[in-house]
Amino acid sequence: MSSPEVDSSRDPLCLRSLLVLTALGVGLRLLLLAIVGELELQSDESNYVYLAIAWDHFGVYFDHHRYLWPPGYSWLLSQFIHFSGAGALLAIKLTQVLASASIGLSTMLLAYRLGGSMRAARVAGIAWIFYLPLAAFTHLLWNESLFLALYLPAIYLCLRVLQGDDGPGVNRRLILAGLLFAGALYLKEAPTYLVPAIALLLIPFAGSPLEGLRRATLLVGVTFVAVLPWCLRNLEVYGHFALANSMGENAYNGLNEEYRNFDLIPVDVQRGRRGLSILSRDVIRRELVDAPPGSGWSREERLTFKDDELVNTIERSQAMTASGLAYMRAHPGWFLRSRIKKLADLVTPLSFYTRHQALGHYDRTPLGGPFMRKVTSLWAVGCVLLVLLLGSAGFFALPKGPARLLLGLIFAYTLATSMLVAMSRFRIPVVPLLIACAAVLLTRDRSERRPLAASATLATWTLLLALWWVNWPEVWTIFSEMVWRAEA
Amino acid sequence: MKRWVPHLVLIGLALLQVALYHSRHRDIEALREAAAQGSPRERVAALHILTNRGPTPHLERKWDRAAITPMIGSGTDSLEDSLLADFAYTVDICRMAKPIWQDAKISARLKGNTLGEIKGESFIEWLRHFLLFRRKVAGRHMGAMLRLKNDEVRWLITAIAGDESAFDPQTQERILADIQQRQTQANMSRTKRMAPPDPEGKRARGEQRRSGQTKTSTPGAKLPGRR
C-alpha cells in the first residue's frame, strides 16, 4: 500500500494559535476546579486514594482483591501524599488540569492531520475547550485526564508515521509513541492489545515489508520494555506475568445473570434513599438484559488457605473469566441481546458530569444550584450528542487511507473492549478523536460528493438513534427526576 | 543494520531486567526468613509477597498462617512495630482467613465509645487501624465497609504521620461520633436494602410500571454493589 502524503503546504501549521486555544482550555478547567473545589470522594476515587495512602505507608501496592489495577495513578498520588500530605488531592487535580493541555493540543493536531487545515484544528480546539464531560474529569480523581494526556499524543505520533512522515524522525516518533503508550498502560490496561494492533497497521504503510516489520517491532518493543518492570514485579508477587488484571471482575459484571451498568448503580443507590424507582430493575428495557432466572454465577471469593489453596487476585480473576465465558456459551441468545444494551450504555447521552449532578455531588458548589445544574447538564448532554453525531459523520468523510484505518481500528477496539461492561466513562478514549473528526466534517470542502460516506453516516446515525431509544427510559428518568429536581 | 540498533538496545534492556528479576527473586524460604527477621519495612514487603504469590510448579502451595499471626499481632507502641500492627488490617492479611480478631479489636472502641487506651492501643492507633480495615479496597468479607471520605483521608494521613497534636480530645470525640454516625447510617441503609421483598409492593410497582408511572418508593429493594 502506498503511504499518501498529507498536503499541508496549503495551510501551514500555526502552533501559536493552537497554544492560545490550549491555554484557554486549561484556564477554563482551572476555573472549573476553583469553582467546584473539593468534591466528596466517590467510588473508585476513594479506592485510588486508599491504595496511594497504603503504598506510601507500607511501601507496597495492594490489589483490589477483585481487581489488580495498573499502579500509575495510585503511585503518583502516593508521591503527592508523601510530599504534601492531605494537599495531595488538590495537587493531583492541578496536575490533571495542566496535563489536559496535552489532550487539547493532541486533539487539535489530530484534526490538523486529518483535515489538513488550520480551520479544522481550531474548530477541534474550541470543541475541546467547551466539551464539559471531558473537562469535568480534571477535577475528579479518576485517571481519565492523565491517561488521555499520554494516549492521545501516542496516537498522533503513530498517525504521523502512518501518513508517511518518513526520514530520521520515524525512529524518534515510534520510540516516543511506545513510551507514551507504556505510560498510558500504567494508568489503564485497556489499550494493552491496541498497541500490537496499531503496530500491525504500520507494516503495509512503511514502504517495504521489512521496514514495516522493523517499525512494528520497535513500537511494541519500546512499550513492552517500559512496562516490563511492573510485569516482573507481578511475577514476583503473584507468580504471574501480568501488567494488571480486571478481566475476571468484568466477566462477572458483564457475563452474568444480573445486569450491571456502573453509570446506573450509584444512581440506583441514591434513588433507593430518595424513595424513587430503581432504574436497573423497574425502568430500563429489561427485555434486552433478562437472563434465565437463577442462571447466574457467584464471584470467586475463596479466601486463601481454604481447601489448602493459595488463590490470589490474578488466579481468582482467571477463574471468573472462565466462568463468564462458560455462561456466555450457555446463553448465546441472551449474550447477543444484552450486547445491544451494552452498546447503548457506551453511547448513552449521560456522562459522569450529568451522573454526578443527578446524584447531587455538585450540590454544595455553584454548579449545583437548580439553574446551573440544569443548564450545565443540558450542555453536557448536548456535547455528547453533537460529538457522537458529527464525529461519526466526520469519520466517514475522511478520505480512504491510513488515517481512517487507524481511527477505525481504535473505534472498533474501544467498542469491542466495552462489550463486557459498558458505561459512559469507557468511551472517553475515543471522544477527542471524535471531536477531531467532527471538526474535519465542519471545515471540509463541501463540493466533494461521497455517496458511500453519506450512506455509512446515515446507517450510523440510525444506529445511534436506535441505541438512544434503547436507553431513553433511564436517561429521561434521571433527567426528569434527579437533574430537574427543584431543590439544591 | 544501523536501523536495527534500537531493537538491539531494547533486547539488551529486556534481558537486563530479566537478569535483575532473577537475581532479586526470593523463594518461599528466603521470604519467610525476611518476614521474621528484617526491618519492619522489609518484613512487610516479604509478607506482601508471601500472602499473594500463587501456586506455581516450583513454589509451595501453602503458607503457614500460624507463622504470620504472631508477626503482626503484637501491636506494640513503637513506631517500627506499629507498621506491622497496621499491616494486620490490610487486605493481604485479612484474606488469609476471616478477620475475626481484627474485627473484634476495631469494634471494641465503637461499642465502648471511649477515647482512652484499650488494651494498650491509643485512639490514634485505633483510628489508623479502623480506617485501614474498614475503608480498605476489598469486599465486606474482609472487613471492608464503606469508602474513604475527604475528612477520613485527612485523619488517616495525619494519623499515619504520627501528628498526635492534630487530635486533641475534642477532635477525637468528633471523629468517633462521625465514624459512629456513618456506621449507623450504613447499617440502616443495608438493613433496608437486605430486607425481604414485599410481595404487595412488588405487585404494585409492576402495575405502576405497566401504567407508565415510574415514581414509587422501594422499601426492601436489593441493589447491586456500588462502584
Image: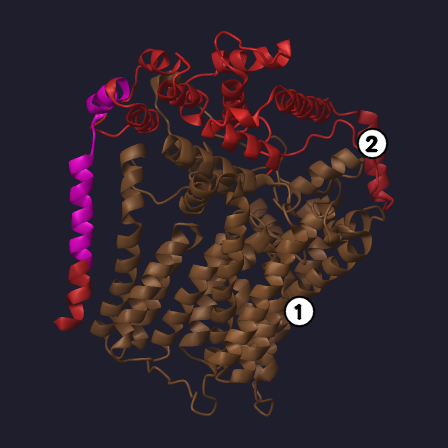
Q: Seen in the image, is A170 located left or right of residue B146?
A: left
Dominant secondary structure, magenta = helix
How many other residues sit within 10 Å of disc 1, few (<14), some (14-19) or many (≥20)? some
User: Along the line of sight, which residue is nearer the eye, A346 or A429?
Assistant: A429
Q: Residue A114 placed where, x, y %?
A: 48, 78
How many other residues sit within 10 Å of disc 2, few (<14), some (14-19) or many (≥20)? few
Quarter the N terminus of chain A occupies: bottom left
Q: Residue B27 placed where, x, y %?
A: 20, 27
Chain letter, colour brown in render = A
| Residue at the image position 48 percent from the left and 53 percent from the top | A417
| Residue at the image position 62 percent from the left and 14 percent from the top | B110
> Which chain letter goes with mark 2?
B
Q: Magenta span has A209?
A: no
User: Along the line of sight, which residue is nearer the eye, A30 or A360?
Assistant: A30
> Is label 1 in a helix, a strand or a loop?
helix
Q: Which residue is mark 1?
A: A386
Q: Magenta span has B20?
A: yes
Q: Residue B157 placed where, x, y %?
A: 50, 33
In magenta, the rendered stretch is B10-36
> Is label 2 in a helix, a strand or a loop?
helix
Q: Which residue is mark 2?
A: B203
| Distance Cα–Cα, label 2 vs label 1 | 40 Å
Q: Seen in the image, is B139 located left or right of residue A244?
A: right
Q: Are marks 2 and 1 on the same chain?
A: no
- Asked if residue A38 is positioned above or below residue A375 in the image, the reply reads above
**Badge number at residue B48:** none
Chain letter, colour red in render = B
Extreme-left residue of the structure = B1
